[in-house]
Image: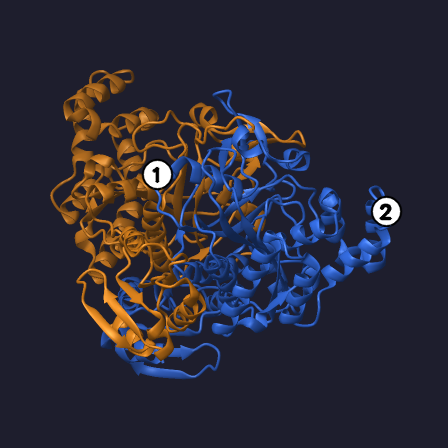
Chain colours: A orange, B blue
Amino acid sequence: METLIQPKVLKGFRDILPEAEIRRSVLTEKLTATFRSFGFVPIDTPALEYSEILLRKSNGETEKQVFRFEDNGKRDVSLRFDLTVPFARFIAEHKDELYFPFKRYHIAKVWRGEKPQAGRYREFVQCDFDMVGTDSAAADFEILSLMKTALAAIGVEKVHIHLSHRGVFNAFLANINASELSEDILRTVDKLNKIGQEEVIKLLTEQLSTVDSATAADKAQSILKFISGADSFDATLALMKELAGDSELATASIKRLDELHAMMKATGIEASFVLDPSITRGLDYYTGVVYETFLDDLPSIGSVCSGGRYDNLAGLYMKEKVSGVGSSIGLDRLLAGLEMLGAVEQKRSFLDAEVFCLDATLAAHYQMVAGKMRSQGIAVEVFPDAKKINQQYNVTDKKGVPFGILIKAEDAAKNVLTLKNLKTREQFEGITIEKAIELIKA
Amino acid sequence: METLIQPKVLKGFRDILPEAEIRRSVLTEKLTATFRSFGFVPIDTPALEYSEILLRKSNGETEKQVFRFEDNGKRDVSLRFDLTVPFARFIAEHKDELYFPFKRYHIAKVWRGEKPQAGRYREFVQCDFDMVGTDSAAADFEILSLMKTALAAIGVEKVHIHLSHRGVFNAFLANINASELSEDILRTVDKLNKIGQEEVIKLLTEQLSTVDSATAADKAQSILKFISGADSFDATLALMKELAGDSELATASIKRLDELHAMMKATGIEASFVLDPSITRGLDYYTGVVYETFLDDLPSIGSVCSGGRYDNLAGLYMKEKVSGVGSSIGLDRLLAGLEMLGAVEQKRSFLDAEVFCLDATLAAHYQMVAGKMRSQGIAVEVFPDAKKINQQYNVTDKKGVPFGILIKAEDAAKNVLTLKNLKTREQFEGITIEKAIELIKA
């Protein structure tokens, strides 16, 4: 006999057992239904691509994390680490086969060789939705509104979407003569929640001092004032307008936020949005509106849905500029958060009923009953072996099956059955299949 | 400016564009609903595993095709090439967390570096369903019945499932003293459809001659008689019984086929099944019932759903024997076949209606109308830019949207709209949103 191989998965990878996979499937299906109701269509791209395609724009950190190798044809290939880069390549490759504005959703696995830690895996599911080929406020709003609707569809009502606009931020920095430091400033502002106001002021002052030490402290205070916002959408917008100045960029960007606010009010969803100028999405490729989403009861897990507007998605692969706006749900992080909050439906199977096996010679009869029930939309399985009834009950317990169907030889002869509510133990004896279907559906 | 990178996918890989991905999603969703209605639950396993786990039992052919590499932690890893090996590893690893009989479905991508050819890709979707931990006829039947029901659910009614039993075949070979040649014989029998009866007889005779040249020709004829079957389930079963002899294996295996036939008749699906002793599933690990499924109108594409019973699924990873029965749908092959037959629903989006953008200043009003409609279950999108109406119609054409909603400033003021059936061009002017919802739903 051969030695046994120890059954185990790779470090940072995991199996998903039925209960968890049911939760993930149900969540995914509700999100999918919402995307479709907004006119988004699905696409798929390969898990494996040329490394050159995936990694050209990446920084060293990404490159270290990627699963990259030489395939049997000596090609330098990598597993995708996000869905954005493949989407950019997809748009460039298929632009003549698509129509614009183009709205796609893509829910799929990505791989990153990160150091494994609690809740972080090397294989995880991303859920992206983007609308490309339009610069309009309507498109920005559609993504924001879709985020709100999709989260509500999966039962996440206690949530706020924090948004800002990179154009206003850039105009503001220009207004205080700090554009040249924008990368450093963005990086510091991004740390606000982690390190606190005092530390941010200190860092900003240091950074600004490298250019003009006389004005550094004032400018740092001004930046803090900008990113702290005020206590309402309108008041914050007024503050941003005041600080950003009246350049063309400032005016257009403030106007965009104003239009989005009007749409939020028109659709009655404004309470879910916070105008929050501290949101910048770091050094990403965003150029317009940007947003992050936090669970009210669990802000500590960070943003569960983020994104923004970009003005040149596929610039690495084609000359034409395609702008767009999109968002990404970190499905595994969101699911982990909802589980911590006890806010996910627990389902152990999709079964409505179990036909118990009381008599192996009735196997064909049991199948007939199950077949009739399924044709009426009842999810039902037949217990396959004539095991002790307690062992059979044990399995229906584990699967959370609500109804049991008991048929002895004399019942089969009369074509009747006993229906048992497995929770209440209530029994209906000697009823027809049709009656049982009625009772299960009720 | 940097040089552009040519946007292209790897040889043997492909993007799936919206129309094709919608077809695949709709198919997958219908299959999923069917699996669930039989009590099957989903699981997931990693795309990447230790090569040792995936490749131990594989033959050289598989090994050559697999995407195998050393990861950043110097581990020897491979992309999975099927869903069966990971399932075996999963069962061994989690047996104490699961309940038996355990029924799972798994629809996921697998990767094989095969020579690309028409309809063959290096990345494709498999759809597996298995029931493990029971030896019963009820379990065999459940898989067969599920195959029939799942195919019917996706509109494939003109289909036949050909089944046989490896036990009967083995008993028959023992009965004619040809067991020691069973591997060669199986390999030859498997070629029947490809090379024809005459060639099969010739090959069999050669093979049998190596043991006893006097009886070789007779035995070859006997094998041909066995695999040719007769013209009905009952007649074929009688023939198999006659030729297989009365060993314990023969008796038990014939009894199993008899029981399955009784269940097919009890559930009224017997016309979809053909007892076909030429089905052996080659040299696979099957030990009981085996089956393949052919489209009546396109048998040339081969089996679209195959499987069988195995008696030791996870033997490489644990001492306990777990037997089971399962089947696998070649989703991409099936989809390709259905497309050739024109038997797939063509859908270009999931939209019911499009709110056209006639006046950019009404953007918030358009969003309000769309929001109201979505809350009533209507899938609707807002055209995001005030482009020429013909350009807007062009996009709704491409997306196959059935209804258009037209709202000018004076309509918005009165909170009415014009609903247009985009196929018939019929128009309903000056109606309320509620009336429009009613008409779209009707």
Q: Secondary structure at mark 1?
A: loop
- The answer to whether any part of residue A360 appears in the image is yes
Quick check: marks 2 and 1 in contact, CB under 8 Å?
Answer: no
**Who is closer to the viewer here, A387 or B433?**
A387
**Who is closer to the viewer here, B95 or B70?**
B95
**Mark 2 closeness class: few <14, some 14–19, many ≥20 residues within 10 Å:** some
- The answer to whether any part of residue B305 appears in the image is no
Q: Which residue is mark 1?
A: B96
Same chain, marks 2 and 1?
yes
* Residue B164 locus on image (x, y percent): 62, 59
Tell me the tag on residue B154.
none
Question: Label 1 marks which chain's residue?
Answer: B
Whole-angstrom CA distance, mark 2 to mark 1, is 50 Å
Image-quadrant location for residue B442: bottom left
Instruction: Give the amino acid type for the residue marked by disc 2 in the picture.
Output: Glu
Question: Label 2 marks which chain's residue?
Answer: B
**Quarter of the image that includes the N terminus of chain A:** top right
* Residue B38 locus on image (x, y percent): 41, 61
**Mark 1 closeness class: few <14, some 14–19, many ≥20 residues within 10 Å:** few
* Residue A287 locus on image (x, y percent): 37, 40
Q: Is residue B44 above or below residue B344?
A: above
**Who is closer to the viewer here, A275 or A69?**
A69
| Of labels 2 and 1, the one closer to you | 2
Instruction: Please state if B368 lies on the left or on the right of A40 as rendered.
Output: left
Tell me the tag on residue B206.
2
First in sequence, mark 2 or 1: give its number. Answer: 1
Q: Is residue A209 above or below residue B270?
A: above
Q: How many marks?
A: 2
**Quarter of the image that includes the C terminus of chain A:** bottom left
Residue shown at 40% from the left, 73% from the top: A372
Instruction: Please state if B316 lies on the left or on the right of A347 as rendered.
Output: right
Instruction: Give the amino acid type for the residue marked by disc 1 in the picture.
Output: Asp
